[in-house]
Amino acid sequence: MAKAPPAAVVPVPARAPNVILILADDVGVEGFSVYGGANPTPNIARLASQGATFDNAHSTPLCSPSRTRLMTGIENAKNYDAFGYLAPNARTFAHMFKEAGYTTGIVGKWQLGGNGFDGLTGITPKGAGFDESLLWQERAGTQKGSRYWGPTLSLNGLPKINEEGFGPDLMNDFALDFLSRNKDRPFFLYYPMVLPHDPFVVTPATLDAKGPQQKFGGMVAYLDRLVGTVMTRLHDLGIDDNTLVIFTADNGTSQLIVNVRGGVSVKGGKGLPTLNGTHVPMIVRWPGKVPAGVRRSGLLDFVDVLPTMAEATGLKAFPGLDGVSQWPVVRGSKASARPWIFEHYAPRWVNRPARFVFDETRKLYGDGRYVALNPATGEETPLDPATKAERAHRDALQRVLDTRGDGPLDPTRFPWCAGETSTDPALPATVAGCGRNVNAVD
Ligand SMILES: [Ca+2]
């Protein structure tokens, strides 16, 4: 008997819109001038001046949980199994585009193939729906190598060790080449940049930078410059008006870095379930389709990105997602698409787990802490819900926490300490630690 033919790919029209999703690594809103930050980032400001900028968009506090959430449109309680890992059977936004006939590419950081400590082997870029890839940390553990100078990369699944060169440049060259090669057919490019994550290094444009703070500033400026080259290439290829571009970041800035935003010093909150851990840039640009230079105040959760891209391009999002489309908010026909954001944050990697829910003004943590939010400064101020209105507000958030059905938080923080002596005899080494840090953990 003849084998069944492979599932037919529905041909997309040649003029179906392209999509580029750029994800910076470890930089909150305070890192960008368009959000009032002191770092000069003119290219990202220009992107914002040509599109819609969300003032209240949130990732999770850490790399892997954010990537899982962004790529699948599903809340972490349901499909986040370990740090540096995404299950091989996961359905991602790349599948959505690929199954619609798009050419799909990814360049930058992967970190989903397994963390090397728990025996789990995660999804491959190909398995996640990407036709082409140039990635750092496609495999975990000791094989990671450098992402910056002389980077250790994988090209379409095969090792590509570079003795020299600056990783972000090599990756950006791949991105630009991908755009040029695919200008005549619909494409999806996911560009999870490695910048400006630590280690803080000099860039080709800031070879004299000294100290983490100055180096970080140079890395953000370099990131901005690379985004500018992507936009220039789109323009030069004549596909500017047929391409949706989204720029965001995967979590707050490193806790080692202090940025100035609107004259206020903002300490990075990466890893923490606070505003400075989750408040990230989100800029959506598509000339002719998205109004230019507008701000959006409604809440946006990373789970919303997949359904938003689906509605924008006329594709069908998978059923059962936790995200909602923000496309009506992007376009301006609606002020807000969601009343709250809930996160089940159990990274199983260094940082303490927490559950929390927040709306535009208040946040309630699973341990009962109730705080007022100031997204402009990142401050969270503890509140005593003494008034009737405040009690009602708190109760409404409590109902969200009570109805998530997400189960207890996994307390694991140091998976590499399994089987070693705990620093606290009352707790397992995977919870309390074993006095051994893992370098360059993410
Ligand atoms: Ca990150």
Image (cartoon, rainbow, N blue to C red):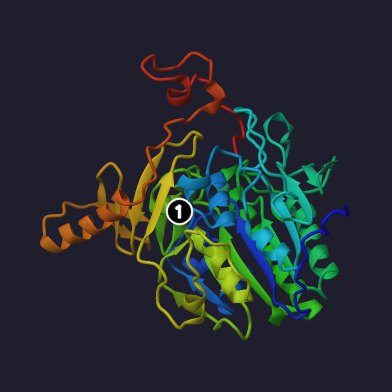
Location of residue 427 with respect to 138 vertically, above or below? above
Image label count: 1
Q: Is residue 256 left or right of residue 88?
A: left
Mark 1 sits on what residue? 278
x, y (%) of residue 121? 67, 35
What is the secondary structure assignment of the residue under circle 1? helix
Q: Is residue 381 visible?
A: yes
Q: Nearer the viewer, residue 405 or 24?
A: 405
Q: Nearer the viewer, residue 201 or 85?
A: 85
Q: Residue at x 62, y 76 (%)?
A: 314
Q: Residue at x 72, y 37 (%)?
A: 139
Q: Is residue 190 left or right of residue 261?
A: right
Q: Is residue 332 left or right of residue 367?
A: right
x, y (%) of residue 144? 71, 36
Quarter of the rendering occupied by the C terminus: top right
The quarter holding residue 51 reads bottom right
Q: Residue furthest bottom?
A: 288
- Dot 1, crowdedness within 10 Å: few (<14), some or many (≥20)? many
The kind of residue on which mark 1 rests is Thr
Q: Residue furthest front?
A: 1
Q: Residue furthest right?
A: 2
Location of residue 395 with respect to 330 vertically, above or below? above
Q: Residue furthest left?
A: 387
Q: Nearer the viewer, residue 229 or 123?
A: 123
Q: Is residue 213 visible?
A: no
x, y (%) of residue 202? 69, 47
Q: Nearer the viewer, residue 2 or 236?
A: 2
x, y (%) of residue 7? 77, 61
Q: Residue at x 37, y 37 (%)?
A: 408
Q: Residue at x 68, y 44 (%)?
A: 123
